[in-house]
Image (cartoon, grey):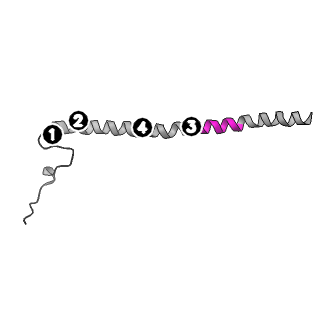
Amino acid sequence: MVYIARSPASVDSGWVTQRNPERSGSVRTGLMIIMMMFFAGLALDIVVPAIVLLALILADRAIYPLFYRRISERGAA
């Protein structure tokens, strides 16, 4: 079996088609946009529940002492 050495320019890099090189840039750009939208959505899916949970924790820590004081004042009277 004979192996033919290729220059790096002739190696197909996957998304680039040798038949239509003008189109390969738009395909890469489209995939990049789709990936950016996916990862931005993923980040939002993680951040929004974390912010809601943090807001609930902070609200609980702020409101609980007010109720605790009222309960203790009611018991003392």
Q: Position of residue 17 (x, y in %)?
A: 16, 43
Q: Amino acid at mark 1?
A: Pro
Q: Which residue is mark 4?
A: 40
Q: Are marks 4 and 1 in contact (CB under 8 Å)?
A: no
Label count reads 4
Q: Residue at x 54, y 38 (%)?
A: 49
Estimate the spatial distance between the alpha carbons at disc 3 and disc 4, rounded to whole Å.
16 Å
Residue 51: give its label.
3
- Callout 4: 10 Å neighbours few (<14), some, many (20+)? few
Image check: 5 left or right of 72?
left
Q: Position of residue 75 (x, y in %)?
A: 89, 36
Secondary element under disc 2, as helix, strand or loop, is: helix
Q: Which residue is mark 2?
A: 26
Nearest to viewer (mark 1 / mark 3): 3
Q: Amino acid at mark 3?
A: Ile
Image quarter hosting the C terminus: top right
Direction left: furthest residue = 2
Q: Earlier in the sequence, mark 3 or mark 4?
A: 4
The answer to which image quadrant residue 26 occupies is top left
Nearest to viewer (mark 3 / mark 2): 3
Q: Are marks 1 and 3 in contact (CB under 8 Å)?
A: no
Residue 21: give its label.
1
Q: Amino acid at mark 4?
A: Ala
Q: Amino acid at mark 2?
A: Ser
Q: Is residue 28 magenta?
A: no
